């Protein structure tokens, strides 16, 4: 009898939770997420449209000059690449489903070596298997948690391309090494950057500042402490209301619960109502979009049509795309075609504004140096903010030495028994390297070996 009397009360709580969740979501607009962020500059944002076009080139069956381009952006330039500089291209047949297709491009015009990965292919079961190879708290990495399937895919790419990357970096010492990707490929690119930064000696002891990543519309792939810590080398690009960087529910749970999606949404309503956001920040297993975030805003709440796109940037700790936006453009904003178009439009507006101001070249160089210092200070502030909010395993900036030198020394592991010297007869794959660095504790959790000094 008492149970029967309690059922109406539970129904009322459930309905109130759903109503509050719907009310918050209906009033939440994508522009609110970056309302307090600063504006990006043209020099800072310039690589983004170019990276989008390199990712889109993976969709072409043939990049030769005589072949027609099927998915190229409108305009005479197309993808803006020289087919002769595409040094390597891997398809699904080459990767055997271990990673999405990618290409390696030598960009002489911008002194850059770019590895670009395509996004999720809805027709490939191997991509779904890669995406679902994870569960909450399954893979621990460098004091945080990462997506297990994406990390293993990154290890496969590095095992296959490490020799070529090392050769190119030695041949072109002034070139940067850039990883980029879209959607699923963006998560793999972020994992590639993390593993390389921790093992720079594998590429000939290259400087940390020569490595960077542009993750286009990335999936949530690393815990908050890692997302903030690697913000100096990883950059995420999000267009307005894109749903994927805001999907806090593990993707594997969404696919497994697709037949009971109303139940999943109902539980999500109750959780968002009963659990404060401060408590979510303290969950070490919760994954986030990686690194520094560039948010392209082109629509305003309660206004029709599109506005000239504006790019906001920051290294947020709290408020890092925590809420899904109920918008008819939530899925369209995830398309790489729209991201490239709006990113190029935003860059053109920035360059036009700079031309109008007619800033002398000397002042422009001083402004770029000031911008780099501002980014370093913003990164330091984000690290301190993470410690203040009691983010698990968060580490504040060291007060000794310069920030770049401290970070580089901190992230390069010393050579130990888990890192044998690389020689012609002691060649180790990246998958074997990850298995040697990490071990399982008594409860079966994957943890870092005590012999590895981070």
Image (cartoon, helix red, strand yellow):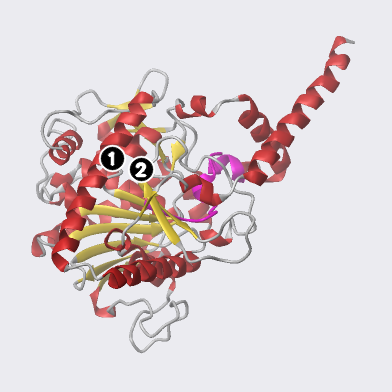
Q: Depth check: 122 or 424 in front?
A: 122
Mark 2 residue crowding within 10 angstroms, few (<14) / some (14–19) / many (20+): many
The residue shown at (31%, 49%) is 234
Lateral position of residue 43 relative to residue 123, left or right: left
Q: Residue furthest front?
A: 357
The residue shown at (34%, 51%) is 235
Q: Is residue 85 above or below residue 328?
A: below
Q: Earlier in the sequence, mark 2 or mark 1?
A: 2
Could you tell me residue 65's position as x and y percent? 33, 86
Whether 237 is among the magenta residues is yes
The residue shown at (43%, 67%) is 340
Lateral position of residue 437 relative to residue 412, left or right: right
Mark 1 residue crowding within 10 angstroms, few (<14) / some (14–19) / many (20+): many
Query: Mark 2 — residue?
Result: 315
Lateral position of residue 135 relative to residue 110, left or right: right
State if disc 1 and disc 2 touch (CB < 8 Å).
Answer: yes
Q: Give the position of the C terminus as an image quadrant.
A: top left
Query: Mark 1 — residue?
Result: 379
Query: Is residue 433 visible to the viewer in this orientation of the structure?
Result: yes
Instruction: Point out the stretch of residues depicted in magenta.
Output: 236-255
């Amino acid at each position: 009898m008492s149970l029967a009397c309690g059922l109406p009360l539970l129904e009322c709580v459930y309905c109130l939770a759903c109503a509050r969740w719907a009310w918050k979501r209906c009033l939440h607009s994508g522009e609110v997420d970056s309302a307090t962020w600063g504006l990006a500059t043209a020099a800072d944002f310039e690589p983004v449209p170019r990276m989008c076009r390199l990712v889109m080139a993976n969709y072409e069956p043939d990049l030769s000059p005589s072949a027609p381009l099927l998915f190229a952006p409108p305009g005479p330039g197309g993808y803006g690449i020289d087919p002769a500089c595409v040094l390597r291209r891997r398809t699904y047949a080459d990767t055997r489903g271990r990673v999405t297709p990618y290409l390696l491009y030598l960009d002489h015009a911008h002194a850059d070596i770019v590895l670009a990965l395509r996004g999720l292919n809805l027709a490939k079961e191997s991509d779904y298997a890669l995406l679902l190879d994870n569960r909450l708290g399954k893979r621990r990495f460098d004091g945080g948690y990462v997506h297990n399937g994406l990390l293993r895919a990154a290890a496969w790419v590095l095992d296959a391309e490490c020799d070529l990357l090392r050769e190119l970096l030695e041949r072109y010492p002034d070139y940067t090494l850039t990883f980029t990707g879209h959607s699923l490929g963006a998560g793999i690119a972020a994992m590639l950057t993390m593993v390389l930064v921790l093992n720079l000696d594998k590429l000939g002891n290259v400087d940390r500042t020569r490595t960077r990543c542009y993750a286009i519309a990335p999936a949530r792939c690393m815990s908050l402490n890692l997302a903030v810590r690697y913000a100096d080398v990883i950059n995420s690009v999000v267009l307005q209301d894109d749903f994927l960087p805001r999907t806090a529910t593990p993707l594997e749970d969404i696919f497994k619960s697709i037949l009971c999606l109303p139940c999943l949404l109902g539980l999500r309503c109750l959780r968002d109502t009963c659990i404060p956001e401060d408590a979510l920040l303290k969950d070490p297993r919760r994954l986030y979009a990686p690194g520094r975030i560039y948010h392209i805003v082109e629509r305003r709440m309660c206004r029709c049509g599109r506005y000239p796109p504006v790019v906001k940037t920051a290294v947020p700790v709290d408020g890092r795309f925590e809420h899904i936006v109920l918008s008819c453009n939530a899925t369209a904003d995830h398309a790489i075609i729209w991201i490239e178009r709006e990113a190029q439009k935003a860059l053109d507006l920035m360059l036009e504004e700079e031309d109008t101001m007619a800033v002398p070249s000397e002042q422009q160089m001083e402004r770029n140096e000031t911008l780099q210092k501002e980014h370093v200070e913003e990164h330091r502030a984000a690290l301190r903010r993470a410690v203040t909010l009691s983010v698990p395993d968060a580490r504040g900036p060291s007060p000794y030495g310069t920030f770049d030198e401290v970070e580089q020394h901190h992230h390069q592991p010393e050579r130990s028994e888990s890192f044998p010297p690389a020689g012609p007869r002691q060649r180790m794959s990246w998958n074997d390297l990850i298995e040697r660095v990490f071990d399982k504790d008594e409860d079966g959790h994957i943890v870092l070996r005590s012999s590895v000094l981070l």
